[in-house]
Amino acid sequence: MKNPFGLSFGILPENFIRREEIIATVMDGFVDEENDAKMYILTGVRGSGKTVMLNYLKKQFEAMDDWLVLTINPEMDILESIASKLYEKGSMKRYFLKTSFNFSFHGIGFSIEGNTPLKNIETLLEKMMEIIKDKKKKVLIAIDEISNSDNIKVFSHTFKNMVNNGLPIYLLATGLYENVYHMSNEKTLTFIYRAKKIHVDSLNLTSIAQSYKETLQLDDVFAKKCAALTEGYASAYQILGSILFKTKAKKIDDDLLSQFDSYLEEINYEKLWEDLSLMDKEFLYGFIAQKNNKAAVVIQNSKIAKTSYSRYRDRLMKKGIIRSDSYGYLSLTLPRLYEYIQRRKIYDEI
């Protein structure tokens, strides 16, 4: 039997727990014209399942005859990528194959109907979108890991103009909180500020337990213990499921936890740690004494000044790494992150 749990980044695994609220929000927002939604950005901590959710939603729109779904690499020229991918769409190419005007860039030739010469890629793209609108089609642009780049800035202006001109173009993107936050505060990227943000939160523990129980034939008690170990973290759900499938483990012991920690560290936590500032890390070292802490304990155990405490607390809460369970208390949100921080502290002191 093939392993039903996946460890590959972003690939839709066989065992996929649907997030019904997110699916309904995006599908209804784009399909229902009365909602008039043009952009959604999925945000969340690294490993929360943003890319998997994006890929699932793409498949839903690809199954609809009136939608053209384009997956765009944000590191490339976005406008050229959109134009070339639209031109090569089998269902639309015949509408672009006109002989009255030719346009070429980077070795890609276009034949577009019209009498006015097209001087740049933006004008070409708008012309193509007008043809698509006339054919009662809609275009969904899917961008994974959006960030503040020159390509995104150029695209943002064209996207905004096309939306304002009533052209049927939509954007579904993912992005880490800090990238989306910085973009929202960029004066040249006001369209990001206006985009509807959807936080990809923890998976439902009952759903995880049920998945483990049915897929791995675990008893009810052990399935619930395994679900609790993941703390609803999407990547941890796949990692632990894969370990259980391979080892046929029937209890949570040191060997299973060691494998779980290794995969979490390699796949998620090393990169997560690299993305943190020095002061973010110092704040998290404040959890070294225990997993759940009073604010005063965090300050005492770290090098964070009392005057800076609330700023770094809020940053890490928005990143999805810590949460405030009750007034004056903080806890870590990700499974076995406390143990990982303990190890990091030892490494940094050597």
Image: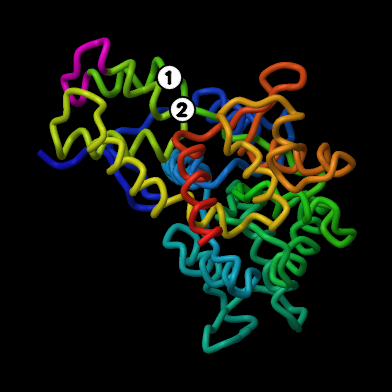
Considering every residue shown, the one lying at the far bottom of the view is 107
> Is residue 261 part of the magenta span, yes or no?
no
What label does residue 284 carry, if any? none
**Image position, residue 259 (x, y; %):** 28, 43
**Image position, residue 264 (x, y; %):** 40, 46
Disc 2 crowd rating (10 Å Cα; few below 14, some 14-19, many 20+) is: many
- Which residue is at 71% across, 30% downward? 297
Tag 1–tag 2 contact (CB < 8 Å): yes
Camera-side residue: 14 or 292?
292
What label does residue 232 carry, if any? 2
Secondary structure of the residue carrying numbered label 2: loop
264 versus 317 height, above or below:
below
Disc 1 crowd rating (10 Å Cα; few below 14, some 14-19, many 20+) is: many
Camera-side residue: 324 or 7?
324
What label does residue 205 carry, if any? 1
**Image position, residue 75 (x, y; %):** 59, 71
Magenta region, residue range? 214-222
Residue 58 seen in render: no
**Residue 147 relative to residue 265: left or right:** right
- Which residue is at 21% across, 25% downward? 215
185 versus 256 height, above or below:
below
Camera-side residue: 318 or 348?
348
Q: Main secondary structure of the magenta part?
A: helix
